[in-house]
Image (cartoon, rainbow, N blue to C red):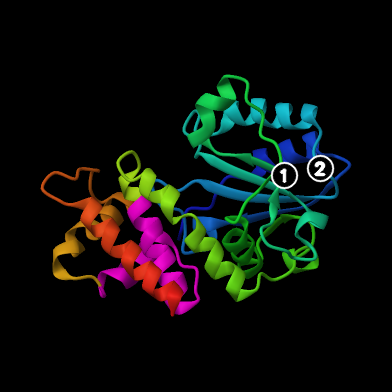
Amino acid sequence: MPEQPGTDHLVQLLHRTLPDTLLGIYLHGSATLGGLRPHSDIDVLAVVRESMTHAQRRELVEELLTVSGVEGRRHVELIVVVRDDVRPWRYPPTCDFLYGDWLREEFECGVIPSPETSPDLAPLLTMVLRAAAPLHGPPPADLLDPVPHADLRRAVVAGVPELMDELDSDTRNVLLTLARIWTTLTTGDIRSKDAAATWALGRLPAEHRPVLARARAVYLGEEDECWDGLAPRACAEFLVREITESYAS
């Protein structure tokens, strides 16, 4: 059976930090798309009645720094949205709070996340609605509107330039995310990263397959991350061209 994510500590933390405004807590991401992989985060969305205070933001960050990726626990990505910011739906949506360990250095230096528009919420909310995996509260459809397909498409494409900027520092994740974007644009589905890579591998030219196959194998814990003798940038640029053509069509 797929590994079940340990979320009790996160649910307790959110109840303690947001006792009066918390409406729902929902699991999404790898845990609901085929199971956690060796490098998977625990992805959680919380829906609240009103925007968090500065003190609540600081408390959440300080607590998450002590549990996310610490003492054998998985890394946590926590996003908080205000219900009235996403229902009725409008684009781009607003993210009230975001914690992810790629921002750990900033948080350790005292940065506190504040509300900002986030196209990435479109695929995330779509995954939450499809997974329907509440950790607390009603089914997500009681709090969230469906994301129009046109907004889902433009949201996934919006992040491509930033992904390419991160190719050298986060090669595996960028390649798999590009494959996932291509898959979503072509099929309308949001698949796990390894499932999206499998779909894309059958459509890649032969010279690019070893690169994406390596990214998928690393993600599954089958190989070490090493790109010697491979050309990840050429593969990424091919994927971007396919994304551009798929979006245009």
As rendered, which of 193 and 182 lies closer to the eye? 182
Residue drawn at the location 46% of the way across and 67% of the way down: 191
Residue drawn at the location 41% of the way across and 64% of the way down: 180
Q: Quadrant of the C terminus?
A: bottom left
Residue 227 location (% of width, % of height):
19, 45
Residue at the farthest left position = 229
* 30 part of magenta stretch: no
Residue that mark 1 sits on: 96
Residue that mark 2 sits on: 51
Q: Amino acid at mark 1?
A: Asp
Residue 214 in view, yes or no? no
Residue 113 location (% of width, % of height):
66, 34
Q: Is residue 13 left or right of residue 66?
A: right
As rendered, which of 189 and 19 lies closer to the eye? 189
Q: Amino acid at mark 2?
A: Ser
Q: Which residues are magenta?
A: 174-203
Which secondary structure, mark 1? loop
Residue drawn at the location 86% of the way across and 45% of the way down: 21
Residue 92, image quadrant: bottom right
Q: Quadrant of the N terminus?
A: bottom left
